[in-house]
Amino acid sequence: MKHAKRLLLALLVAAAPAAAVLPDEQLQDPALEARARAISRQLRCVVCQNQSIDDSDAPLARDLRIIVRERLQSGESDAQAIAFLVARYGHYVLLKPPFELATIALWGGPFIVLLLGGGFVLVYLRRRRPAAASPPLEAADEARLAALLKEESH
Amino acid sequence: MKRLLFLSPVLILVVVLIALAIGLRRDPSKIPSMLIDRPLPQFALPGVYEDAPGFGSHDFTGEPRLMNVFASWCTACRVEHPVLMQLRAQGVPIYGLDWKDKPADGAQWLRTSGDPYLAAANDESGRVGIDLGVTGVPETFVIDRAGRVRYKHIGPISPDDWRDILQPLLQTLRAEG
């Protein structure tokens, strides 16, 4: 049992996502390297589609990781380093698409669906209300109802 | 009004189906070029052959040309190669950019299979290719007489691609003042 637990732990550790960043790419300065890793995770590998360049083993992803590090080393901000690649590969290179005219349906779509659905529910509830609210009982009916209820409770 | 409300789910379904029919047919690996209607980025590269010069962005003036990005390690380029040889025979001006490849390997590939290019330049580091937004090989840029990129073809050029897309485009560009 103890062995099994240890084995499981070892397997879980081994299963941790392995990034594709190779030791020879890494920067000496840990702060700069951390920034480079954070940027790389936001950039799409243009060869392999739904992988970030941080995860991808593609040679072009490696080139782009090195470019990001070079830009940071030359003193550029994170935004400038990202802009360098966006200028070459377009917004496609960003894993999180920016809010702009071309992506308005993407970002606005859920809210439009919510508005449509909400409107539908509202109209539905409005229509139901008049049927639910019936006029109050007259005095004679009220007395009869009380009598009937009294009878029931016996 | 009531009928419209009743039909609205059907209408929404139709709109969604049309959007999917368009969206799902697009090849997500084909990334639109950022360079369309913009001048080539500045570059100057050495030749693939030891004894022949390469080319640079300043060479793309005077007449519209194609710039084909290739590599000796690229299998899809082998599919495209006979088409390029045919274009060469027809006198279509094509420049070849040997991307992420050793010059000796690029030269070897062109010597053994045939060289369809007016000039072949080597981009061993791949940096010029990245400046051009190259995502893989082969890719072919159509460049007008002012040195602006007008179109990028991703993947091998088939005879149909040439007849339907590239040839008409080159003709239009030649007719431009």
Image (cartoon, coloured by chain):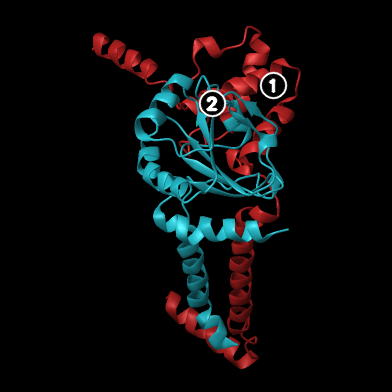
Q: Is residue B170 shown left or right of residue A6?
A: right
Q: Are marks 1 and 2 on the same chain?
A: no
Disc 1 vs disc 2: Cβ atoms closer than 8 Å?
A: no
Q: How far from the left and from the top, in percent, is residue A150? A: 49, 79
Q: Residue at x 45, y 81 (%)?
A: A151
Q: How far from the left and from the top, in percent, is residue B117? A: 50, 38
Vertical placement of residue B24 versus B29, above or below: below
Q: Residue at x 50, y 23 (%)?
A: B49
Q: Label for residue B122? A: 2
Q: Label for residue B166? A: none
Chain with red colouring: A
Residue that label 1 marks? A71
Quarter of the figure that contains the N terminus of chain A: top left
Chain with cyan colouring: B
Disc 1/disc 2 C-alpha distance (Å) = 24 Å
Seen from the viewer's position, the closer of residues A59 and B142 is: B142
| Residue type (three-letter) at the residue carrying disc 2 | Asn
Vertical placement of residue A142 versus B165, above or below: below
How many numbered circles does the render carry?
A: 2
Vertical placement of residue B46 versus B35, above or below: above
Quarter of the figure that contains the C terminus of chain A: bottom left
